Amino acid sequence: MKPAKHTQPSCAGQDAREHDEERAYSVADEPERVSQHRLTARVHQSIVAALLLLALAPSGAQAFSKAIWGPVYQNGVSQFPLYQKLGVKIVEMDLNWSTVAPTRPHNSANPNDPAYLWPAEVQQALAQAKTFGMQVLLQIIGAPRWSNGGHAWNWAPRPGAFATFAGAAARHYRTVHLWMIWGEPNRRPNFQPESPAQPGRLLNHAQQVAPHNYAGILDAAYGALKRVNRHNLVIGGATYTTGDIDTEQWIQNLRLPNGHPPRMDVYAHNPFTWRVPAFSNTPSPDGEVMFPDLKRLGGWIDRYLHRGLPIFMSEFTIPTAVDQEFDFYVDPPTQATWITDALRAARRWKRIYALGWIHVYDNPPASSGGLMTADGSPKPGFYAFEHG
């Protein structure tokens, strides 16, 4: 799709309407505020939640967690016992706004509006996570056509509409406190309008549109999610190893109209690597930010965004055969060694918040980066991840 000039004269009015809906919902649609009994119970629940969330709060010495993208059920069997065996503490899932709200709700701020089609899979994951002592992370991605001028799901929505949905999602999923905003927006297939740039170059006006749009929806979502629960953690950036705009360029240009960087609690990056995952490696070529470049990434975050933000490796995998997803692979023993090395390095650098693995199972020919083969046989990497 050829990027068009990003002009939407009606955005201000639409965003104001959505902001008014959110305010109206928060003031008028919570009758428990007038009940002393319910208020007392709610205060008690808030205290308990705050204590539980201390381990999630980003800081220079937060505990490292293993995360995973994977199914709730496989062939009718819950996968959460498997995730527990692997030492997983965070299960990552998509929450696709374009499928949750294909038609515009009458009151977008109200999670009970009949237009919302909340996915059963998320509720199933939350029930399993509670049983096995895990957290569910939801990545909000995808925009319905009514929010972005009639474009496809990957076209930037109005920030106000996105924020209102984020707030509604947080009200619907009260036990979710980890929220990631979009995924790999520095790639044109995932985020539009976006003009590609040569690595290492200053971006021109057209190339700045995508990171500016992303900054707007991230900052707006941050405010909405914090209004629902100040303990919600908002994870931004969500960049890819490489992209149509490289990671350093993306971070440099994450700016709001006032020139400030967007608010976030944690920075996410997917550091897929065809090089040994050691921080001592030389910089990767062509603007790529692989696992060995994470400390350089930290320097850019400190310089251009917010000093000391924790880093979440949201997606990481190492293929063991030719597949359609990546243009490299290693043998299974090397995958295990690299997993061990990556987890050891991540635990030692206290700035790493979590490492998230994708592809629990191989799915040839599409992907071969699973910890298990397609028939469920563990690879050496399974045991490396389990003990790492």
Image (cartoon, grey):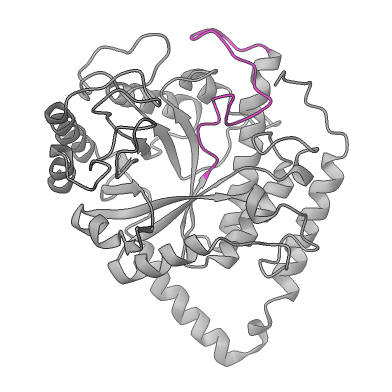
Q: Quadrant of residue 208?
A: top right
For image coordinates 66% across by 50% down, the residue present is 163
Q: Is residue 71 above or below residue 369?
A: below
For image coordinates 17% across by 45% down, the residue present is 378
Residue 175: x %, y % from top left = 46, 67
Residue 304: x %, y % from top left = 50, 26
Q: Is residue 151 above or below residue 136?
A: above
In this orientation, which residue lies closer to the viewer: 125 or 309? 125
Q: Quadrant of residue 73?
A: bottom left
Q: Residue furthest bottom?
A: 37
Residue 252 lies in the magenta-colored region? no
For image coordinates 58% across by 37% down, the residue present is 262
Task: State the quadrant of the N terminus.
Answer: top right
Label total for image: 0
In this orientation, which residue lies closer to the viewer: 8 or 368? 368
Residue 185 lies in the magenta-colored region? yes
Q: Main secondary structure of the magenta part?
A: loop
Residue 249: x %, y % from top left = 52, 18
- Residue 366 vs residue 138: left or right? left
Q: Quadrant of residue 313?
A: top left
- Residue 43 vs residue 258: left or right? left
For image coordinates 36% across by 56% down, the residue present is 56
Residue 343: x %, y % from top left = 20, 38
Task: State the quadrant of the C terminus.
Answer: top left
**Residue range of the region highlighted in magenta in the rendering:** 181-204
- Residue 153 vs residue 276: left or right? right
